[in-house]
Image (spheres, grey):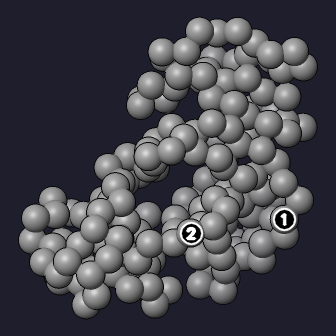
Amino acid sequence: MDKLILSRKLGYTCGPAGVPVDTPGYYIVRPCVNAMGLGLGAAKSYIEKNTEWLDVGFFWCEWFEGRHLSVDYHYGKQELCVEGFKNPNTFTTWRKWQRVEDTVPLPEILEQFKDKEWINCEFIGSKLIEVHFRNNPDFALRKDMSEFIPVWIEDEINTPAGYEYVECLELHGRVGAYIK
């Protein structure tokens, strides 16, 4: 669950609050540990050098671009891969998650855990950014689900044709989802 430890083990350019960056630029800044996930506390920040202004318990890491994939492994074998499409300028609200056919091998760093029932990995591009010892809770609602469109507290519930509305509350304002 410690994203700083994971980032360091993967060789990413990163460090805890208080350790300066070598090269000025944009970095992702987020809590080292966030058991709730959901991107809570994350921000894209331009850092010149000094990081003493970051909150204690936060870290900075090089910025990655690319598709956001969430992959579930069941006893080390890929069971699910979904692509997330987030709303601009946020790390907590997503427009939709869609099942995709990508095959993503279990990262070598996690081979020692392949006897765990579930491992959920989050990737940006080909870069592993988070690991959870659980499956994707949204796609666990229904095995045959192909799409999950979050409904936020400020949204009017108006179920599109071909979808079903389900209530699934999250602490950052999601009240439900349209699924198919």
Residue at image point 66% right, 86% down: 108
Which amino acid, by three-letter code, is at mark 1?
A: Asp
* Count of residue discs: 2
| Quadrant that contains the C terminus | top right
Residue 57: image quadrant is bottom left
Secondary structure of the residue carrying tag 1 is loop
Location of residue 104 (image quadrant): bottom right
Residue positioned 73% across, 23% down in the render: 178
Residue 149 vertical placement versus 102 (above, below): above
Instruction: Identify the mark nearer the N-term, 2 or 1.
Output: 2
Q: Nearer the viewer, residue 87 or 60?
A: 87
Expressed as whole percent of the image width and height from the top left, the position of residue 100 reads 84, 54
Residue 143 visible in image: no
Foreground disc of the pair 2, 1 = 2
Quadrant housing the N terminus: bottom left
Residue 112 quadrant: bottom right
* Kind of residue at badge 2: Glu
How far across and how far down the image is residue 140, in percent? 73, 39
Q: Which residue is mark 2?
A: 65
Q: Which residue is mark 1?
A: 102
